[in-house]
Amino acid sequence: MREFKVAILPGDGIGPEITKEAVKVLNAVSELFNVKFNFIEADIGGVAIDKYQEPLPEETRKVCLESDAVLLAAVGGPKWDSTKPGAKRPEDGLLELRKLLNTYANLRPVKVYEELIASSPLKPEVVSGTDLLIVRELTGGIYFGNKGREKDFAFDTNLYTVSEIERCVRLAFRLSKLRRRKVTLVDKANVLETSRLWREVFLDISKEFDDVETEILLVDNAAMQLIRRPSTFDVIVTENMFGDILSDEAATISGSIGLLASASIGESHPYLYEPIHGSAPDIAGKGLANPLAMILSSALMLRYSFNLFDAADAIENAVEKVIQNGYRTPDIATKADKAVVGTQEMSNLVIEFLYEDFKKN
Ligand code: IPM
Ligand code: MG
């Protein structure tokens, strides 16, 4: 039997409750697909600051580096919000972890479930058919450049090397070949030097992929086109901060950010998997959180880290079935929806459909 070591980082807010549900689903997978997962839990974010005065303690680093994949829920909350220079922030733990694992590309698929179109803030005819993938550069740019604060000024530096851009853009092109063969670069080349470098590297690499259609949009225009014509995008590749902003926008188009998963890919394992949504402290501990993004993140882990393609498909199909059958957590429920369920019920349903499908095949 194949065995995998999975680091589990529940983090803050709704993190622990959705993590529990994802682990339940993975245990069902292990029973059905004859694999074994060894879960090792560790602290990150606000809980880690409270316990160890560090958002990414040494022990957590060790657990992650020794694992085959890392599954993380969410970090942050009002308790740790501070604008004071030097204050320890839960988010720093996440950034340090991305850097530690060198997960340079964050893949954020946004697919619209036809049954959930009513939950999208956009018109059905605009969102219908949307199926895009944001490839966000994750370990460079303004997030990690030199920064500082003096009495009356502050600065952040945006810096990219050619090789950082190349590996990310090349991955975007490769991924587009498994999809609809179109890559859109988003930059701000009319203002930023870093963007002009991104554009040059993008145009160079595009020559290696002459069967892939290319498009280049300035980020302000891209923000507009995403809500005007979301279904025309296939792969979008962009720098760290633009990717952060546009992926929340794209996620909203799908009807619920509570459904979207992400995979952060590096040059070597372990990779990092996390939902796009945050720690939602306002609903934490109430059993209302949508566990689907976390469950779908674990499906991405099975696919990209363990090559368990059938198991990943099975989870994704089960989630689709649950939605097709009308079950909704409050974040994706409209007034017309009758079967509104909580966090645990939602994952139990996913597991039920998983078993049901397995019996049929
Ligand atoms: C995300 C989040 C993080 C980011 C925060 C929590 C640091 O918004 O994963 O998109 O900005 O990368
Ligand atoms: Mg974000």
Image: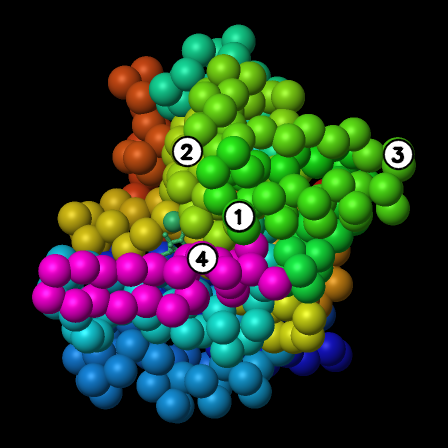
Q: Nearer the viewer, residue 265 or 353?
A: 265
Identify the residue at horizontal 55%, vertical 38% (top origin).
Answer: 189
Question: Is tag 2's residue or tag 3's residue first in the polypeptide sequence?
Answer: 3
| 303 with respect to 22 (left or right) | right
Q: Which structural element holds mark 2?
A: helix
Task: Give the main secondary structure of the magenta stretch.
Answer: loop
Q: Are marks 2 and 3 in contact (CB under 8 Å)?
A: no
Residue at the disc numbered 2: 249
Mark 4 or 2: in front is 4
Crowding at mark 1 (Cα within 10 Å: few <14, some 14-19, many 20+)? some
Question: Is tag 1's residue or tag 4's residue first in the polypeptide sequence?
Answer: 4
Q: Is residue 85 above or below residue 283?
A: below
Give the amino acid type for the residue marked by disc 4 in the picture: Asn
Residue 10 location, quadrant: bottom left
Query: Alpha-carbon distance for marks 4 and 3?
Result: 32 Å
Residue at the disc numbered 3: 211
Identify the residue at horizontal 70%, vertical 36% (top origin).
Answer: 183
Query: Alpha-carbon distance for marks 2 and 3?
Result: 29 Å
Residue at the disc numbered 1: 193
Is-magenta flag for residue 149?
yes
Give the amino acid type for the residue marked by disc 1 in the picture: Glu
Identify the residue at horizontal 31%, vertical 21% (top origin).
Answer: 334
Query: Alpha-carbon distance for marks 1 and 2?
Result: 25 Å
- The boundaries of the magenta stretch are 137-161
Identify the residue at horizontal 82%, vertical 34% (top origin).
Answer: 212
Q: Are marks 1 and 3 in contact (CB under 8 Å)?
A: no
Q: Which structural element holds mark 4?
A: loop
Residue 311 location, quadrant: bottom right
Give the amino acid type for the residue marked by disc 2 in the picture: Glu
